[in-house]
Image (cartoon, rainbow, N blue to C red):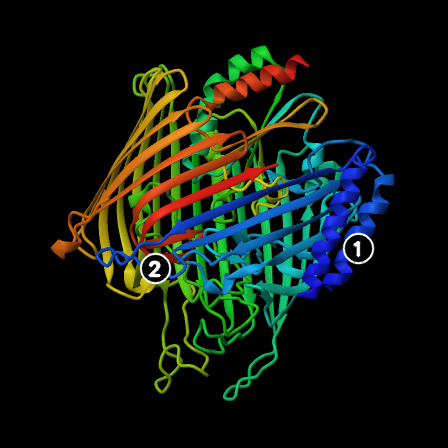
């Protein structure tokens, strides 16, 4: 079995370069869920603008601090740049149903997705939450950051500034 | 071993072929690695054991390749030797996880190892958590078919990871999802959204028992729906399985069932949530003789909230697969900024209550005691609540930004914890817990965070107090010192200070942390699945990076 897989791997890597997908993005084709229960491929969520994806969970204090901090500055950021602020919650079936009331109660105005078995988190190799990714307009991953401490939102602001200039 | 070497050789070839042709290949290589090392000094007072190896280390690296609909990846793990508290059966070096996945518009194949969840996961959830030492990935074949938007069918077959081997049982599963709004054009714009789903999972394990005739094929079913309109949402899942005598249920022949209901309402500034769960003999593993966190097939989400403040994690709830009935409700409200009570920046108030009891259990007849092995176990009235209290958590949390520089968070919690059921010692414990957290951003990118926590109980190890101070210089540095003081321990010599210090450096997605100090014995839980964490005294180093 292992041998078979190894051969497949080598074969595939040497043969596959010939084919390509219509829309290029660094995001993999993993399905995530909207708050009203619709599954969509992560490949399709980016519109033609820079995108921030923040992985978080309701039980994760630094994650909530990060998204609270961005809530407070988001109106200013929106005036300055045209970008997408996406959050992906890795709450599992224990607390997945808490996400919608949680974000509404905090008056967060982001795009929300659920990744209840951490499929997308795993595919993007984020070891823990919070973990923040920044994609440029063309869907290329240009920056990522692990963890959150107060003031990190200023760094994200600078990165957004760089990416929207280009 | 030879095969492992072959895989490694193939990966190296693959690397070279990919890198030499990087210009032509539009795909993406990504991955991460993590290393956790700890030294162990014996400390009889806190119960810390020395390690004969002096230093223990858990590490892994993931690498994956994505191009269009194709992806492949593997994980290398080296546990030399496994950190204390995690099963030493993980000792060793190898590649326990590898897969190839190909996806088109309507088909999605995976060969190799995969993680999957059907519905809420009560029948089937394979997942990994390195801190818990859980990894029950299925190795086999999975196919997902989307014949038209709104319908999705998943089928799988395989065996589960069991440390460096595979478990004995064969797992077969089928799951279907129908989203009416996507399926029917007339409902596409409807504000009411309705989705249905169903799963069937079966496991096969030969009956080698000398005493009992055991079912070799155990089938389980689940049905679910999700209804939402505006801010309202209602979802439920009911699951049932045939008799499945196992080490968990003491080899009783009773069928099992579980029901989960979640309802919520959300509007700007207000969120309300209610969840009800009843579990009756629903432990589900691919090997009936296993225990603890080994070869779990189903996942029973606990009806309790998870916390990260240290003293609030001292007595965490663990799901009781043999029977539990619980209710949890949470109300979260944001008092508007600029209002009288909300202050200049607004104030968040959250109320939570979780109550879990045993289910009602009565003897089948006068001659068979409740739960006697080889019998039908017990009778249970679905609508009756058992007398045994398992868990009570009533708490209120207030979070408020006081000024541009200051933030405060206050929590009070009342807790009942059935230590006998969760840990096999003591009895029903009650505790009061309070937490105060202050964050002071005294100049741009420089923040000091302080925590003061107290836990008061007459049982177990008595009262605790904790202080923590953390200084962060965004975006790179942090340093923290904490002291947990068990000042109320019934034995005077054990009134110990657990001092712990950490310094860390972060650069983008790379993180290095060095810590030193004493850690108390405790229980670590993720999603109601727990493991014991032994007391430790020594250095720990943790490095992780994502690329």
Q: Residue A8 carries which label?
A: 1
Of B355 and B1, the residue lying toward us? B1
B302 relative to B449 in the view: left or right: right
Chain ID at mark 2: B
Instruction: Give the position of the N terminus of chain B as an image quadrant.
Output: bottom right
Q: How crowded is mark 2: few (under 14 residues within 10 Å), some or many (20 or more)?
A: many
Spot occupied by residue B371 in the image (x, y as percentages of width and height): 39, 77
Can residue B140 be seen here? The reply is no
Spot occupied by residue A31 in the image (x, y as percentages of width and height): 67, 42
Chain ID at mark 1: A
A93 relative to B405 in the view: left or right: right
Instruction: Give the position of the C terminus of chain B as an image quadrant.
Output: top right
Can residue B10 be seen here? The reply is yes
Q: Which residue lies furthest to the top in this view?
A: A79
Corner quadrant of residue B541? top left
> Where B441 sits versus A35, above or below?
above
Mark 2 lies on residue: B357
> Where B189 sits versus B329, above or below?
above
B16 relative to B133 in the view: left or right: right
Q: How many marks?
A: 2
Q: Evaluate whether label 2 is on the same chain as label 1.
A: no
Spot occupied by residue A111 in the image (x, y as percentages of width and height): 58, 29
Q: Is mark 2 on a helix, strand or loop?
A: strand
Q: Residues within 10 Å of mark 1 (few under 14, many from 20)?
A: some
């Amino acid at each position: 079995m292992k041998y078979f897989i190894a051969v497949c791997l080598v074969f595939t890597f040497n043969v596959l370069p010939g084919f390509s997908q219509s829309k290029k993005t660094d995001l993999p084709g993993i399905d995530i869920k909207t708050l009203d229960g619709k599954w969509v491929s992560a490949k399709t969520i980016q519109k033609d603008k820079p995108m921030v994806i923040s992985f978080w969970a309701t039980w994760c204090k630094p994650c909530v601090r990060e998204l609270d901090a961005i809530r407070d500055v988001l109106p200013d950021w929106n005036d300055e740049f045209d970008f997408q602020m996406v959050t992906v919650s890795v709450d599992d079936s224990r607390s997945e149903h808490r996400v919608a009331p949680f974000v509404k109660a905090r008056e967060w105005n982001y795009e929300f997705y659920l990744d209840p078995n951490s499929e997308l988190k795993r595919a993007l190799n984020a070891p823990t939450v919070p973990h923040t990714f920044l994609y440029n307009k063309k869907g290329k991953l240009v920056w990522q950051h692990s963890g959150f401490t107060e003031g990190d939102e200023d760094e994200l602001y600078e990165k957004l500034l760089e990416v929207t200039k280009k | 071993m030879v095969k492992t070497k072959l895989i490694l050789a193939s990966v190296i070839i693959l690397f070279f072929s990919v890198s030499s042709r990087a210009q032509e290949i539009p795909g993406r290589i990504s991955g991460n690695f993590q290393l956790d090392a700890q030294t162990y000094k014996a400390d009889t007072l806190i119960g810390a054991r020395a390690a004969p190896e002096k230093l223990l280390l858990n590490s892994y690296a993931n690498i994956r390749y994505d191009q269009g609909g194709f992806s492949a990846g593997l994980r290398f793990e080296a546990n030399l030797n496994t950190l204390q508290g995690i099963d030493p059966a993980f000792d060793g070096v190898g590649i326990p996880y590898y897969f190839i996945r190909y996806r088109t518009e309507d088909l999605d194949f995976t060969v190799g190892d995969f993680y999957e969840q059907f519905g809420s996961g009560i029948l089937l959830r394979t997942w990994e958590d390195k801190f818990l030492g859980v990894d029950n990935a299925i190795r086999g074949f999975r196919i997902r078919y989307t014949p038209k938007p709104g319908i999705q069918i998943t089928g799988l077959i395989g065996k589960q990871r069991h440390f460096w081997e595979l478990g004995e049982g064969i797992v077969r599963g089928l799951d279907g999802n129908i989203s009416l709004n996507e399926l029917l054009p007339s409902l596409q714009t409807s504000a009411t959204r309705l989705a249905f789903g169903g799963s069937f999972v079966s496991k096969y394990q030969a009956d080698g028992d000398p005493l009992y005739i055991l079912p070799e094929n155990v089938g389980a079913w689940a049905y679910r729906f999700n209804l939402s309109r505006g801010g309202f949402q209602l979802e439920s899942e009911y699951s049932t399985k045939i008799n499945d005598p196992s080490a968990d249920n003491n080899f009783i022949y009773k069928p099992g069932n579980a029901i989960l209901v979640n309802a919520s309402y959300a509007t700007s500034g207000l969120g309300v949530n209610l969840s009800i769960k009843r579990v009756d003999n629903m432990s589900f593993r691919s090997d009936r003789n296993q225990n603890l966190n080994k070869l779990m097939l189903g996942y029973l989400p606990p009806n309790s909230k998870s916390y990260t403040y240290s003293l609030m994690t001292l007595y965490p709830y663990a799901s009781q697969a043999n029977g539990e009935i619980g209710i949890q409700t949470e109300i979260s409200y944001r008092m508007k900024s600029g209002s009288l009570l909300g202050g200049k920046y607004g104030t968040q108030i959250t109320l939570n209550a979780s109550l879990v009891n045993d289910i009602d259990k009565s003897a089948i007849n006068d001659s068979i005691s409740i739960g006697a092995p080889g019998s039908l176990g017990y009778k249970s009235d679905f609508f009756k609540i058992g007398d045994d209290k398992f868990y009570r958590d009533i708490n209120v949390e207030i979070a408020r930004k006081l000024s541009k520089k200051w933030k405060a968070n206050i929590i009070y919690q009342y807790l009942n914890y059935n230590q006998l059921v969760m840990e096999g010692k003591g009895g029903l414990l009650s505790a009061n817990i309070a937490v105060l957290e202050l964050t002071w951003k005294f100049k741009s990118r420089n923040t000091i965070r302080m925590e003061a926590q107290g836990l008061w109980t007459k049982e177990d190890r008595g009262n605790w107090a904790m202080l923590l101070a953390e200084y962060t210089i965004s975006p790179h540095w942090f340093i923290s010192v904490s002291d947990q003081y068990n000042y109320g321990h019934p034995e005077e010599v054990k009134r110990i200070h657990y001092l712990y210090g950490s310094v860390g450096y972060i650069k983008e997605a790379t993180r290095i942390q060095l810590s030193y100090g004493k850690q108390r014995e405790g229980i670590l839980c993720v999603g109601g699945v727990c493991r014991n964490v032994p007391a430790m005294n020594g250095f720990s180093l943790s490095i992780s990076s994502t690329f």
